[in-house]
Amino acid sequence: QVQLVESGGGLVQAGGSLRVSCAASGRTSSSYDMGWFRQAPGKEREFVAAIRRSVGSTYYADSVKGRFTISRDNAKNTVYLQMNSLKPEDTAVYYCAATLVPVGSYYYYPRRYDYWGQGTQVTVSS
C-alpha cells in the first residue's frame, strides 16, 4: 500500500510555471508506475503524464507535450510535474496516481491506477 500527497499547486498567470510534487509513503515509489491526471469543473478526469518505474519512460497528453515534464526522485519517493507555459485551460485539480501492476500501454487510463492522492488545485489566470 502507498499513500500519496500532492503539493505545490497555486495561482499563476498565463505563461508562468509551477511545479507540483507527489510524495509517496509506504512502499517505495520505485515499485510503482506513476501518473498525473487533472480534472476541471464539469469535466471528466483526464490523463496528463505518466512515468514507468524502472526505465523511467515518460508519456504525455498531446495538450501538454512540450510544456510539461514528469520526473521522479526515487531516493525521495517523490514524483514531480514541472509545468511551463501554462494556459488558462490548464486550470484543474491535479491528482497523482500510482499502481503496482505495470500499466503497459494503458498509462492514460485512470482505472489502471490503484492509489490516488487528494489533489492540488492549479489555477491559471489570463
Image (tube, rainbow, N blue to C red):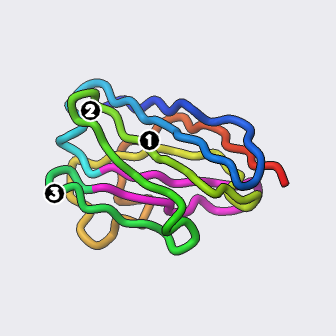
Q: Which label is found at residue 116?
A: 1
The amino acid sitting under disc 2 is Gln
Q: Nearer the viewer, residue 35 or 64?
A: 64
The amino acid sitting under disc 1 is Trp
Mark 2 or mark 3, whichever is nearer to me: 3
Q: Earlier in the sequence, mark 1 or mark 2?
A: 2
Mark 1 or mark 3, whichever is nearer to me: 3
**Does the magenta segment cover residue 45?**
yes
> Tag 1's secondary structure?
strand
Q: Earlier in the sequence, mark 1 or mark 3?
A: 3
Name the main secondary structure of what is drawn in magenta. strand
x, y percent for residue 38 = 58, 53
Q: Is residue 75 above or below residue 89?
A: above
Mark 1 touches mark 2? (CB < 8 Å): no
User: Magenta span covers which residues?
Assistant: 34-51
Assign the N terminus to one quadrant of the image.
top left
> Tag 3's secondary structure?
loop
x, y percent for residue 74 = 22, 35
x, y percent for residue 14 = 75, 53
Q: Which label is found at residue 1?
A: 2
Q: Residues within 10 Å of mark 1 (few under 14, many from 20)?
A: many
Mark 1–mark 3 Cα distance, whole angstroms, equals 22 Å
Mark 2–mark 3 Cα distance, whole angstroms, equals 22 Å
Q: Is residue 3 left or right of residue 91?
A: left
x, y percent for residue 37 = 51, 54
